[in-house]
Image (cartoon, helix red, strand yellow):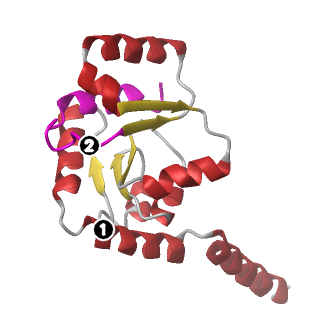
Amino acid sequence: PVKNTELFVEAVQKVNRVLFSDWKFCIVGEPTPQFRTYVERLCQQDTWIKERLVQYGGVNDRQMLYELYAKAKIMCMTSQSESFCIVVAEAMYFGAYPILTNFGSIIKDLTDDGHYGTIVPQKDAMELAAAWEMAAHRDDLPELGRQIQTFARQNFSYDVWSAKLDKYLCRITANK
């Protein structure tokens, strides 16, 4: 429930179907039985959604996960709360444009205060759908994806953070 994936599905129902006629909306993560039933029922009622909504379940294979990130144009996180949310940084590392609900102060760091992504209200499927549409309409999305990739690699890579931590630890150790 904290992942608020129902909001994601509600937004899929509200998007401009012509604009997204050749897109797939992928959900990665182990669903609850109730969510699985909800999506199955929806797919029986709406063939457009059935053809475009893909549930991968839990993905433990890092190679497969990286392949999904590499294919993604947009990474969406609808959580009600998160800590650092490493999956967003990982998707950005592959150039995906983040569209995030306002789940915590970390989103400002992840998106460089909205410069590299869009932040939407917590429970507003129309706003989420509008953000997807805005991103899909961007002519500069491929170039922006490369900028996002550079930003993520310069700010969130393990090498960068471990070097900063090493420098800090060496400095405080030298002062003892």
Amino acid type of the residue tagged 2 in the rendering: Asp
Which is nearer the N-term, disc 1 or disc 2? 2
Q: CA distance from mark 1 to mark 2?
A: 17 Å
Residue under label 1: 142
- Magenta highlight on residue 8: yes
Q: Is residue 166 above or below residue 59?
A: below
Q: Secondary structure at mark 2?
A: loop
At x 26%, y 43%, the residue is 22
Q: Is residue 84 left or right of residue 149?
A: right
Provide residue 47's location: percent of width, then percent of height: 26, 20
Q: Quadrant of residue 111?
A: bottom left
Residue span colored magenta? 1-24
Q: Is residue 141 above or below residue 21?
A: below
User: Is residue 74 at least partly visible in the picture?
Assistant: yes
- Magenta highlight on residue 124: no
Depth order, front residue of 112/133: 133
At x 48%, y 58%, the residue is 70
Amino acid type of the residue tagged 1 in the rendering: Pro
Residue under label 2: 22
Q: Is residue 80 above or below residue 43?
A: below
User: Mark 1, mark 2: which one is toward the viewer?
Assistant: 2
At x 71%, y 81%, the residue is 168
